[in-house]
Image (cartoon, helix red, strand yellow):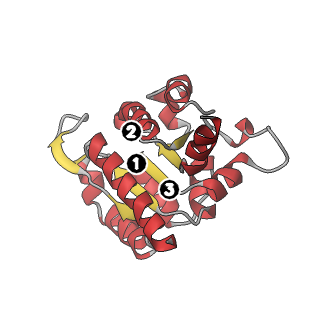
Amino acid sequence: MEHEKRSEMKDRKTVVLGVTGSIAAYKSAELASLLYKQGHDVFVVLTHDATEFITPLTLQTLSKNPVITSFYDEKENWRPGHIQLADRAALLLIAPATANVIAELAHGLAGHPLAAIALATRAPILIAPAMNGKMWDHPATKENVATLGSRGVEFIGPEAGMLACGYEGLGRLWKVDEIAFRAEFLLARQDNLIA
């Protein structure tokens, strides 16, 4: 029985869930819970703006792991926590991703732990955007998405519908269960590449 538990723990993959400052950040709670129930070790990294929409405590409770909100949360040992997570990640999933964070990633900026993890990881990156439709359609955002896509970053969504700003259009976060399904697919694809 103990051997089975150890084997089960060993097979768990690390998913780093990045959450940015979008009203859709509340959906990251359901996403963290789904990923945990799928058998993954989930580590959540919140941008400063994300903490205005959802608390670290909520995501810590659902993920069963500490939540990083700044570089100063990382005092456990000599090695920076964001680099440890970058190395350990089997997948970096950013959901929701704002236009600002997509721009930071496209330009290689690393002013917060989530962007630093994205620069340092060699794991696949899956981004689920959520923003105003005009922001999504802006040429700068389109260019940033294309730049990231050319580097192998995958996108899921956004979808059309009523947006928090009162507009209707493309910009809503993709369905959470479908994001989790896509994450699972990318993790399984890695297993197939290794095998």
| Circle 1: residue type | Thr
Compared with residue 54, is residue 135 higher up or lower down, i.e. above or below?
A: below
Name the amino acid type tagged 3.
Leu
Observer-nearest of 153 and 161 = 153
Q: Where is residue 100 in the image (x, y as percent from the top left)?
A: 44, 52
The furthest residue to the bottom: 150
Of pointers 1 and 2, the one earlier in the residue sequence = 2
Tell me which amino acid carries mark 2. Ser
Reading the image, the residue beneath label 1 is 98
Residue lying furthest right: 78
Q: Please tell me which residue is depicted at 35% across the width and 34% down the height of the picture.
A: 27
Say which residue appears at 44% left-offset and 39% top-offset: 21
Q: How crowded is mark 2: few (under 14 residues within 10 Å), some or many (20 or more)?
A: many
Q: Quadrant of the N terminus?
A: top right
Q: Residue tagged by mark 3?
A: 91
Question: Mark 1 vs mark 3: which is more N-terminal?
Answer: 3
Res 46 quadrant in image: top right
SS class of the residue under badge 3?
Answer: strand
